[in-house]
Image (cartoon, helix red, strand yellow):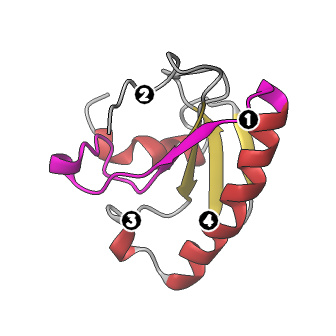
Amino acid sequence: MSDIGSLFEKIVAGKIPSYKVYEDDLVFAFLDINPLAPGHTLVIPKKKYETLDKVPDETAAAIGKVLPRLARAIMKATECKDYNILQNNGTVAHQFVPHVHFHIIPRPNAKAGLGLSW
């Protein structure tokens, strides 16, 4: 894909196939195409905002309302009790797609998922 910046907009518009797990007027969630664990889900605003500080309050509140609901559903579906929610802003912070997105990553065990050490 030549324009990674419009990737999520194309997914929301149905121009690129995805496995949708949630949708409302402001928020769209779908399974990650390269999951770190089964159930790895991306939660995005339907409209493109490059970083979280640019997201309007109404949209941010809608995402905040949906994240716990989706986390509960993903944990039930994957039978995991542990998970990460990640969100990066800017290339230095490892944001690859310039469209705000939250990762919900189930952690079935200590070796699955991120490989981060704090």
Amino acid at dot 4: Ile
Q: Is residue 16 above or below residue 49?
A: above
Residue type at mark 1: give it: Lys
Q: Residue furthest bottom?
A: 57
Question: Residue 3's image quarter?
Answer: top left
Q: Taking 44 as reference, is 48 left or right? A: left
Task: Identify the mark at residue 63; answer none if there is no mark.
Answer: 4
Of the residues under marks 1 and 2, which one precedes in the sequence? 1
The alpha-carbon separation of the residues under discs 3 and 4 comes to: 13 Å
Foreground: disc 4 or disc 1 = 1
Q: Which picture quadrant has residue 76?
A: top right
Residue sitting at the far left: 92
User: Magenta segment range?
Assistant: 77-102
Disc 1 target residue: 81
- Residue 51: assigned label: none
Residue underneath mark 2: 114
Q: Residue at x 56, y 59 (%)?
A: 46
**Picture disc at residue 49:** 3
**3 or 4: mark nearer the eye:** 4
